[in-house]
Amino acid sequence: MNRLVLRSALMQAMIASAYVVLVYIFQFASFGLIQFRVAEVLMILVFFDRKSVIGLTLGCFLSNLLMGAIFIDVIIGPVATLLAGIAMVMTQHHPKVAMIWPAVFNGVIIGFILSYGYVLAPLVISIPSVFIGEALVMYLIGLPVYMILSRNQGFKELFNPKAY
């Protein structure tokens, strides 16, 4: 196996693992009508390597599966992460704008799942609830962390395969 392919696969596995661990640690805030899924802060990794979308999507899938989410959430929840990651990559030159995409996609998609899959609340409550929680994670935690990491040359080199 090509060394760069192996390195990339291992990187995605580490990202997925980190996502699962964060969801597990903060499980009390990662599910339900009011969500503050701290693991979503890892979405900023797409600014350093767009392939991170793979690890993030896998991490979301595994988290939902392992934490006992309903079937539709296990399958469709990661689609929200995938779409948000793709939208972030497409708007990555404007990180402050790009960070809204996880809130938009999760707000709508997870809002529907909470309303019709879990029957927790009507859409007019579930969509804004998820949107606000996601936006808070991305802007209160994600933006400052991104600003720090984007100036850290050592961190950026982790995502540069030519460095190895």
Image (tube, rainbow, N blue to C red):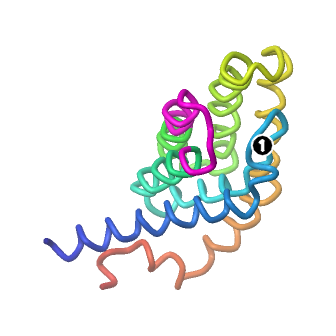
Measuring from the top left, give residue 137's x and y in whole percent: 77, 51
Please rate how many residues cluster around mark 1, counting C-alpha atoms within 10 Å: few if below 14, some from 14 to 19, many from 20.
Answer: many
Residue matched to label 1:
135
Q: Residue at x 55, y 41 (%)?
A: 81
* Towards the viewer: 155 or 38: 38
The residues colored magenta run 65-80
* SS under mark 1: helix
Measuring from the top left, give residue 41's x and y in whole percent: 67, 57
Q: Is residue 74 magenta?
A: yes
- Which picture quadrant has residue 73? top right
Measuring from the top left, give residue 52's x and y in whole percent: 45, 57
* Towards the viewer: 71 or 150: 71
Above or below 17: residue 74: above
Left or right of 10, for residue 98: right
The quadrant the C terminus occupies is bottom left
* Towards the viewer: 5 or 21: 21
Q: Residue at x 82, y 47 (%)?
A: 136
The disc labelled 1 sits on which kind of residue? Answer: Ala
Q: Residue at x 67, y 64 (%)?
A: 146
The quadrant the N terminus occupies is bottom left
